[in-house]
Amino acid sequence: MKSPETAAAGRFASKRSSFLVAAGILLSRIAGLIRDRVFAHYFGNSDAADAFKAAFRIPNALQNLFGEGVLSASFIPVYAALLARDEDEEARRTAGAVAALLALSTSILVLTGVLATPFLIDAIAPGFSGEKRELTIRIVRILFPGAGLLVLSAWCLGILNSHRRFFLSYTAPVIWNAAMIATMWGFGERYAQFPLAVVLSWGSVVGSALQVAVQLPVVVRLLRGLHLSLAFHLENVRTVVRNFFPVFISRGVVQISAYVDALLASLLPTGAVAALAYAQTLYTLPVSLFGMSVSAAELPAMSGAVGAGSEVAEALRVRLDAGLRQIAFFVIPSVAAFLVLGDVIVSAIYQSGRFTHTDAIYVWGILAGSTVGLLASTLGRLYASTYYALKDTRTPLRYAVLRVILTTVLGYLSAIPLPHALGIETRWGVAGLTISAGISSWVEFTLLRHTLNRRIGATGLPVAYLVKGWTAALVAAGIGRALLLAVGHRNPIVAAIVVLGAYGTIYFAGAFVLGLSEVRALLSMLSRLRARSS
């Protein structure tokens, strides 16, 4: 049994790891928002914007399939367990073999993707034709090699996370975003939209190479060299591969869902694909900042849990429940902000140049639809990580398949027939896509929690905690909306600073008054980190 001092130190280490992941993700997401703001300035909701955003999804699927999520579920539990048992040499051999297998398979897929691009475009964006279709094909072919490099970056992230080097791995994408921003700033005034989209694609590839380059020296030092081999015969490598395929399929069906969204959006009026992408950038921000940060920090710790079955189950329950509270504390106000103050957020980030206030209202509607499932999808990440720590990759796969089927059916009905039946403008069908995805996320989350609770015991958020969190968030959002009436929309950035600043302050004050312990824990952690750095 751990002493109270040891347990407290462990909780602090976990919160510190989550904080470092969140800080790294925050920096990279801020860079991504700046990138999207510059993109919106030069492209707006034009045909070129649709083409680039649609093209970006296809090679990005390669990164998602082979990248961070899959490696986190299959590689990190095995590698982190080896480190926990002090089997450093075996850990290094496993890491080198996984890197070689990953590089080989990714190279084959990149080549196949480049050759098959026209067929991929017909499958993902059948609504594109003429010059718009040709531009999309050209962009995809340029982006594919960059996506392959980002897969190797995800392998670096797996090594770094297992060694608790969270900050570097999650700030590395800043340099990729910076390369794209520099490309648009450097060439935006010199090229028309279509050729600028091609130049931007090359800027993305350069950024991908730089993202790998900043991580590789530290990874090589941690591994004491880079020992590449196709040592498939190693038992730990086989375990990684066995775990890999269920998660690969799971990520694959999720990508199918994204493809369906893009396909349906391509059938809607010009601007639907780009507007969906703008909204998704904002929607995924809290998912990454809070869901990913806690899940990424907890996965190595959960994977290293040792002892009898009941002891492991108890350790997982404690870590899971604490992580759920951390996530909900930040995601609940994110949902309220997107729903009530979404126009303020979208206008402040995107409204510039070709992106008008009308475009901002359109994106807000799509963003509001995404709030339906934001909490479920974020909490679901931590539940999935718990399964991965238990070396169970198949249960999350089954539920992911069900979620994708539901999303596809509901998405089609909400995006195409329903607007016609209700007499709504067809372009608003894209909001139906985000709503249907949210409903499906709740189904998946409920199943993940129910099955895991039967396995390790009861877990979840107390009703009283949820009531307090929602009360603080909605009251703060209502006050923020009233304040917006006084400030107005004339200067979107000033309005955002005033309204969102007040909203955040009121939420934290309300949470403190209502007794949510996360406020005190956050202040205590920041105080301890400040004391350690001084």
Image (cartoon, grey):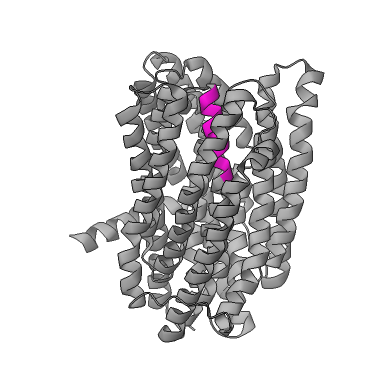
Q: Name the residue located 45 percent from the left edge and 23 percent from the top edge.
A: 193
Query: Would you say 261 lies left or right of 499 here?
Result: right
Q: Quadrant of residue 177?
A: top left
Q: Position of residue 74 (x, y in %)?
A: 57, 69
Asked if residue 374 is positioned above or below residue 68 in the image, the reply reads above
Q: Is residue 302 visible?
A: no
Q: In the visual, does 378 lie left or right of 184?
A: right
The picture quadrant where one finds residue 89 is: bottom left
Can residue 512 be spotted in the picture?
A: yes
Asked whether 497 or 394 is in front, the reply is 394
Q: Is residue 429 above or below residue 111?
A: above
Q: Position of residue 317 (x, y in %)?
A: 59, 68
Main secondary structure of the magenta stretch: helix
The answer to whether 299 is drawn above or below residue 447 in the figure is below
Q: From the viewer's perspective, is 491 left or right of 423? A: left
The residue closer to the viewer here, 272 or 370, is 272
Residue at the (77%, 15%) spot, across then down? 423
The residue lying toward the viewer, choosing from 502 and 172, is 172
Specify start and end residues of the magenta stretch as a single range: 47-58
Residue 500: percent from left, percent from top? 41, 30
Relative image position of residue 166 (x, y in whole percent): 38, 61
Q: Is residue 483 magenta?
A: no
Q: How many marks?
A: 0
Question: Which quadrant of the figure contains the C terminus?
Answer: bottom left
Residue in the image at 57% along x and 65% along y:
73
At a point 42% along the width and 14% down the height, the residue shown is: 488
In the image as oriented, which residue stretches furthest toward the front? 115
